[in-house]
């Protein structure tokens, strides 16, 4: 069954399993880099909010052998699991004080997110943009992030400069930077995925041999924002005693190379483009650009 037929059929089946007053609709949702994903929305008349249940992942499981009945069960279970969260008053999750203490940076591609950037506060950074998320925690939903929208600033009486200062203060506190050798990251990845040797994960050399390191954060999520932190970059440049080339490999991390070790930024740009085309999902793409951090004047420039 092709995707369009699956989407129509699963929507009909889910609706048939719910009381008549429930509304079941399909809506595309925009994610990072303008990537659109279809969601099934189940709404009760008495509940103004409803969860977004992404369909593409369930369709992939269907292609791998999941039955339609199992797909229905998966969607309905996701809805029921989210129902208790939907009853939580938004005031319990976010307010002025929470924003000030828990707003953080994330870094995205500016050109690919033009439509989104019209709706949210952001800080231009070279060909990228720093955007703002409020980190919230709840016993039922765990830890998540709420994207700061333009109307938040008026509603919560927070100015753009105050928002930016809070994000600059909170990001290193809540998600500290981590600078590691590429072999260490690969070893960590291998432990998570069950790879038994470096040959299974494509690279064997230590950072000292390759001259390549990784800048991210301790959670390994959205750590590429440290590309915009000159204090962190200055510290790394001091450790390596050189200028730096920085290669954004995704929104989660960037690779770091000593400028003394690798002189040609164009060849690095070819490497970035290849990685982005073959190994990075569309919604995690950051840029094809290679940046150079100049140790002496503490400035980040586009190198290629």
Image (cartoon, rainbow, N blue to C red):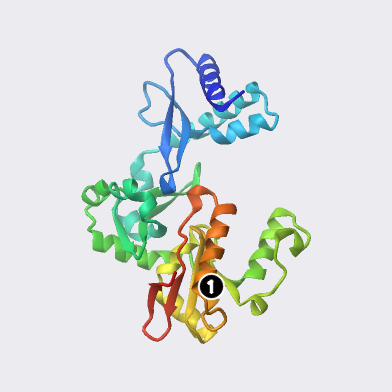
The quadrant the N terminus occupies is top right
Res. 75 visible in picture:
yes
For image coordinates 68% across by 28% down, the residue present is 66
Q: Which quarter of the picture shows residue 51?
A: top left
For image coordinates 38% across by 73% down, the residue present is 301
Element class at badge 1: strand
Residue in the foreground of this view, choosing between 277 and 20: 277
Residue of label 1: 256
Residue 228 pos. (x, y %): 40, 68
Residue in the foreground of this view, choosing between 193 and 37: 37
Residue 268 pos. (x, y %): 53, 69
Residue 111 pos. (x, y %): 36, 53
Residue 58 pos. (x, y %): 59, 32
Residue in the foreground of this view, choosing between 223 and 262: 262
Tell me: 187 left or right of 125.
right
For image coordinates 70% across by 66% down, the residue present is 203
Neighbour tally class for label 1: few under 14, some 14-19, many 20 plus, Cα within 10 Å: many
For image coordinates 49% across by 68% down, the residue present is 176
Above or below for 294 versus 302: below
């Amino acid at each position: 069954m092709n995707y369009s037929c699956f989407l129509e059929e699963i929507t009909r089946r889910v609706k048939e399993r719910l009381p008549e007053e429930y509304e079941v609709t399909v809506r595309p949702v925009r994610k990072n880099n303008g990537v659109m994903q279809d969601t099934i929305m189940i709404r009760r008349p008495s509940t103004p909010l409803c969860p977004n249940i992404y369909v593409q992942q369930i369709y992939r499981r269907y292609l791998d052998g999941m039955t339609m009945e199992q797909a229905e069960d998966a969607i309905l279970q996701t809805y029921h699991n989210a129902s208790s969260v939907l009853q939580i008053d938004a005031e319990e999750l976010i307010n002025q004080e929470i924003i000030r203490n828990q707003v953080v940076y994330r870094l995205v591609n500016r050109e690919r997110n033009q439509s989104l950037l019209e709706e949210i506060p952001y800080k231009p950074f070279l060909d990228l943009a720093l955007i703002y998320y409020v980190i919230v925690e709840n016993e039922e939903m765990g830890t998540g992030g709420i994207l700061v929208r333009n109307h938040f600033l008026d509603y919560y009486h927070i100015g753009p400069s105050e928002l930016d200062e809070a994000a600059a203060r909170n990001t290193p506190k809540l998600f500290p930077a981590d600078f590691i050798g590429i072999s260490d990251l690969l070893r960590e990845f291998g432990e998570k995925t069950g790879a038994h040797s470096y040959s299974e994960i494509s690279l064997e050399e230590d950072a000292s041999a390759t001259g390549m390191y990784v800048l991210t954060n301790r959670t390994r999520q959205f750590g590429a924002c440290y590309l915009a932190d000159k204090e962190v970059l200055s510290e790394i440049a001091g450790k390596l005693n050189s200028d730096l080339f920085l290669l954004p490999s995704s929104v989660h991390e960037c690779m770091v190379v000593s400028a003394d070790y690798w002189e040609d930024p164009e060849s690095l740009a070819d490497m970035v483009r290849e990685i982005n085309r073959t190994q990075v999902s569309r919604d995690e793409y950051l840029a094809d650009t290679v940046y150079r951090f100049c140790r002496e004047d503490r400035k980040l420039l586009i190198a290629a």
